[in-house]
Amino acid sequence: MSDSSSTSSRAHRVLVLGGARSGKSAFAEVLAAEGGPVRYVATAMPDPADLDFAERIARHRDRRPADWTVLESADPAAVLTADPFAGTTLIDDAGTWLTARIDARDAWDAPRGTIAPDVDALVDAVATYSGRLVIVTPEVGMGIIPATRSGRLFRDEIGTLNQHLAQACDEAFLIVAGLPLRLK
């Protein structure tokens, strides 16, 4: 996955992209575990009324090793800028974070770019983070054009976010059918 020179103490940022059920989170978890202790930043905030989403979160929790430090945070930029970590920080995932930011700004009907300050803050935090970092994000731009405005907004905003994150990261992988393709 990565050679020993890429897991040194210097900053190293990895972006892991993939579609739904592609295996991106499992791949990112393996990468994160290669770098010693893991701090897992879960961006999903559970909604007790959404049983399907709660089941997805439970599967992720069950898969994680018990010795990982888990933070549930809707603000991964604040985590990265406020608290240095000696091991690897894993953020899962940028798409859930983006959805929460659009919700928080009530921006589903606002012009594209309304959440740019939030995107810029996250990208800046990633670019300046001094430790090992693995970020999971969905790749949604390979399918049909969504029929709804909110679907098109999300697709456009995550595409922009992913481009900026890829530029800020040292490595990027696209996961397809559980297989990693190294992009950079």
Image (tube, rainbow, N blue to C red):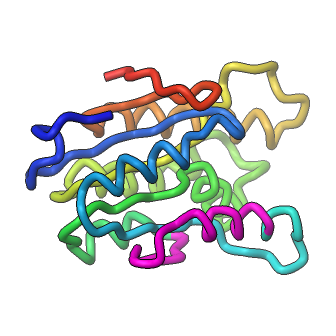
Residues rendered magenta in the picture:
55-74
Q: Is residue 73 magenta?
A: yes
Q: Residue at x 46, y 38 (%)?
A: 16
Q: Is residue 24 above or below residue 67?
A: above
| Quadrant assignment for the C terminus | top left
Q: Nearer the viewer, residue 88 or 120?
A: 88
Q: Quadrant of residue 55?
A: bottom right
Q: Residue at x 47, y 27 (%)?
A: 180
| Quadrant assignment for the N terminus | top left
Q: Is residue 183 left or right of residue 43?
A: left
Q: Nearer the viewer, residue 157 or 126?
A: 126
Any part of residue 153 in sight? yes
Q: Quadrant of residue 59?
A: bottom right
Q: Position of residue 72 (x, y in %)?
A: 53, 76
Q: Residue at x 80, y 38 (%)?
A: 151
Q: Is residue 54 above or below residue 31?
A: below
Q: Is residue 169 left or right of residue 77?
A: left
Q: Nearer the viewer, residue 108 or 27?
A: 27
Q: Quadrant of residue 80?
A: bottom left
Q: Is residue 101 magenta?
A: no
Q: Is residue 110 above or below residue 130?
A: above
Q: Position of residue 51 (x, y in %)?
A: 88, 70
Q: Position of residue 179 (x, y in %)?
A: 53, 26
Q: Nearer the viewer, residue 9 or 116?
A: 9
Any part of residue 157 in sight? no
Q: Is residue 143 above or below residue 2?
A: above
Q: Residue at x 52, y 57 (%)?
A: 92
Q: Is residue 137 left or right of residue 15?
A: right
Q: Is residue 172 left or right of residue 66?
A: left
